[in-house]
Each structure stands twice: as C-alpha cells, then as structure tokens.
Image: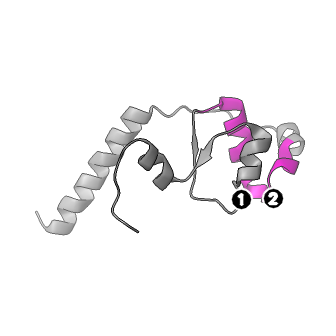
Amino acid sequence: MAKDEREGSRLIDDYGLALKLLAPERTPRISREEFDAHRHLIRHGNDVPVLVTAIKARPDWLVTANTEHFTEDVAARTGLRIVTPHDFLRMCGIRLPPG
C-alpha cells in the first residue's frame, strides 16, 4: 500500500473513531419561526440554522473554525461555549504541531 493510501486509510479510521467518541446526535430542522426569532443573534444568515440548533441542543461545546461569525459576542448572547477546533483540542490536552 502506497504512503498516500495509508494516510487516507488512517484519516478515515481516525474520523470513524472521532464519530464514535463524540457520539453526534441528529436534530430536527429548524422552523421558519425559529429562524426569524433568532436571526438577530448572528450576522450571517446562513449560520442561523447552526446557531439555533446549538441553542436547542445545548452542547457542551460548539466547535467551529468560523470565528468571523461565531464571535465572543454571539457566545455571550446565547450562553454557548464557542471554541475553535485547535483551542478545543488544546483544552483536551492534545498537543498539535505549530501552525
């Protein structure tokens, strides 16, 4: 097996393990009323369904690389703990190579 194939296989295995450990849950689609009621909380309209779903699901963490829209202000107004993937892994004690 070539190096690229091994790398791809390892990534698939790692993703499968992450899904098992994180135990993601499926949530119902938000309604138009929920969208409209929460639209004022975030600047980008495409992010409203993600935000409303998180508010309803009350996850321990909302992990996103979208720090342009999921800001500290959004976190404060919704009570969600919003972090980047890098910060989340660092808080979990996982050391990542620099940048």
Q: Is residue 63 left or right of residue 96?
A: right
Helix, strand or loop for disc 2: loop
Secondary structure predominantly adopted by residues drawn in magenta: helix
Q: Is residue 58 left or right of residue 3?
A: right
Residue positioned 57% across, 52% down in the render: 64
Residue positioned 81% across, 37% down in the render: 31
Residue positioned 37% across, 66% down in the render: 98
Residues in magenta, as a range = 38-59
Magenta span includes 42: yes
Residue type at mark 1: give it.
Answer: His
Q: Are marks 1 and 2 in contact (CB under 8 Å)?
A: yes
Magenta span includes 63: no
Helix, strand or loop for disc 1: loop
Q: Is residue 26 above or below residue 6?
A: above
Q: Which residue is mark 1?
A: 69
In the picture, the quarter occupied by the N terminus is bottom left
Q: How is the image coloured?
A: one colour
Quarter where residue 21 is shown: top left
Q: Looking at the rendered structure, which numbered label has been put on residue 77?
A: none
Residue 44 appearing in the image? yes
Reading the chain from its start, which is encountered first: label 1 or label 2?
A: 2
Quote the CA–CA distance across marks 1 and 2.
6 Å
Q: Which residue is mark 2?
A: 43
Q: Position of residue 27 (x, y in %)?
A: 63, 33
Q: Nearer the viewer, residue 16 or 89?
A: 89
Q: Position of residue 3 (x, y in %)?
A: 15, 67
Q: Is residue 39 above or below residue 3?
A: above
Crowding near pointer 2: few (<14 within 10 Å), some, many (20+)?
A: some
